[in-house]
Structures are given as C-alpha cells and as structure tokens.
Amino acid sequence: MSVTSGKTRPSLTQEILSHLGLANKTAAWGTLGTLRTFLSFSVDKDVQRLLRAIAGQGFKSNEAGGSLPLKTLLGPGELIAQPSSGFRCGLQCHHGRVDQQDQRAKAAHLSSLPGAHPADFQVEAEEDIKSETSDILQELLLALAKGVRDRYSGIIDYNLVEQDVQALKQAEAPSTEGTWVLIFTQRNLEHLIRVFDQYQRCTGHELEKTVQNRFHGDAQAALLSLASVIKNTPLYFADKLHQALQDIKPNYQVLMRILISRSETDLLSIRAEFKKKFGKSLYSSLQDAVKGDCRSALLALCRGEDI
C-alpha cells in the first residue's frame, strides 16, 4: 500500500489484480466451479425423489437442475471413468480405428482429473482400453487412467525441467515412445508448462510440431490433445463445448460430460474463455441450442450469464 495525504490507497499491482477477469478468481465458495457445497444434502431423501421421478409421481423437471445434487447420480470423476458410459462410449471404434475426437476428449478429461478414476471401475476400464486400443495410445490411456500424475508441491525443479526437455529432444527416434508417455502422464501440469516453454526456447519451435512429425493417427491426436489441455485447460473445454453446440443437433453427451465434470472445479474459467473467444456467453449459447428437459439442468450447471 502507498500513502498519500495520510490516506492509504491500493498499489498499482493490487489495482490491476482487482480488475482481473472471472477466469482468475475463485467464487465465494472457494473454487472456480459453479456449484457450491449443498449443506442439507441427504442421500436417502434424494434417492426417494429419484424414485418418485422414475415412477412419474409429481416430479418437476426443473428439480434436477435445482437443488438435487449431481453426486446423487454420479460424481464428476465417475462420469469420466465409468466403463459403460466412459471408455466404451469415448473409445468408439469406426471401421477398426478409434474415433479421434472422442478419444482426444477422453485423454484430456483423464489428464485434467488426476487420481479421479474410481477404484470400482479401475479393472474394467483397463480391460476396455486393452481390448479397444493398442501400441502407444494404449500405453497413454492406461497411464492416464491410473492417475499417477505428480502433484505440484509449489517448488519448481528447474533441473528436472531441463532433463525432460533433453529427454524429449532425444526421443524423436523410433522406439522412444515410452519417454513421451512417461513425461506427458506423470509430470504435474505446472511442470509440463515450463517444459513446453523451455523446449520451444531450445528448439525454436513448439513441442506440438515435433509431435506432428514424430507421431501419426490416434497417438498424434491424443498427444496434441493433452498438450492443449495442459497449456490452457479452460480454453480446451470451451472449444469442445462450442463444437458440441455447432451441430444441427447438439452433442448432449459431450455437453453433459463437460458441464458435470467441471462444475465443481473450473466451469467459471471455462465460461470466461468461451465468452472471450466466441463473443457470446456459454449460458446464451446453451439457451439457443439446447431443447427438452435437460435444458434447465444444463443451464443450472452453467449457473449464470456472462455480460
């Protein structure tokens, strides 16, 4: 704080910070998610409400988007990991090849939710991956599914950053895919951002260019997707939401998967990136594109308009 005429006023830094966008500020409940803790949560009561809804006994459609906690149905980690609606759905095979768009989204979700893979689904999910993928793509998804990524301790290991940069530079030859899998799936995101920056300074080009030259097909798609989500996770999901809304019929699976899984972590940031890039709020985009009973639930997850 600086002092002028006996009065204190904010420093220039504090003044700038006070005007930063929503994407950099946590909400009143301490996260960048749109949902806050529901203190009156009762499993038994909500199960009864769901049973009445299934039986058609006076359940209002807007209740699902109101006070009914989503975790009554499925937690964010489980939404990503559940085999019946996750890997089998996200790793759709078309003419013997994995659908790249679904696979990229799956890899990105797993990368941004380290350790979120529920133990109940671990074995079955790994079996799905092994039966539906192969080679480096299989190694990559298995590593992500296990959730072994390091957690950022707040200490920057510059020696390890340099070691990883040199390892990736040397891993451009055949039979070195394991190095890419290890670094992309085990290092924490803050570390990887520094690795990407240092790699560009050393080589004169972005790491993604090396990935495009070194890998092909689904492996390339997965690594490029991971690079995008590592560099700017909210922007990655904003792009995916925008793509899901552009079809003649919105891709409800993608919309639900992202809005539910990010509603407790960084959906406020995703909203801000969406508005910044596309010039229209996510809330208004959902209002215009989504129809039917799930519309109110998705709008409730989005929570509000961005002016």
Image (cartoon, grey):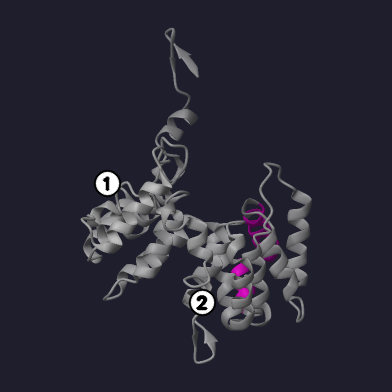
Q: Amino acid at mark 1?
A: Ile
Q: Which residue is mark 2?
A: 88
Instruction: Give the residue furthest to the bottom.
Output: 95
Q: Which residue is mark 1?
A: 307
| Count of numbered tags | 2
Return the residue nearer the eye: 173 or 245. Answer: 245
Q: Position of residue 61 (x, y in %)?
A: 23, 57
Q: Amino acid at mark 2?
A: Arg
Classed neighbour count for the residue bearing mark 2: other residues with Cα under 10 Å, few (<14), some (14–19), many (≥20):
some
The span picked out in magenta is 191-212
Decide whether residue 103 is among the magenta residues.
Answer: no
Classed neighbour count for the residue bearing mark 1: other residues with Cα under 10 Å, few (<14), some (14–19), many (≥20):
few
Return the residue nearer the eye: 276 or 107. Answer: 107
Describe the element under mark 1 as helix, strand or loop: loop
Q: Is residue 89 above or below residue 62?
A: below
Instruction: Determine the main secondary structure of the stretch shown in magenta.
Output: helix
Image-based side of 291 in relation to 104, left or right? left
Q: Is residue 297 above or below residue 222?
A: above
Dot 2 or dot 1: first in sequence order is 2
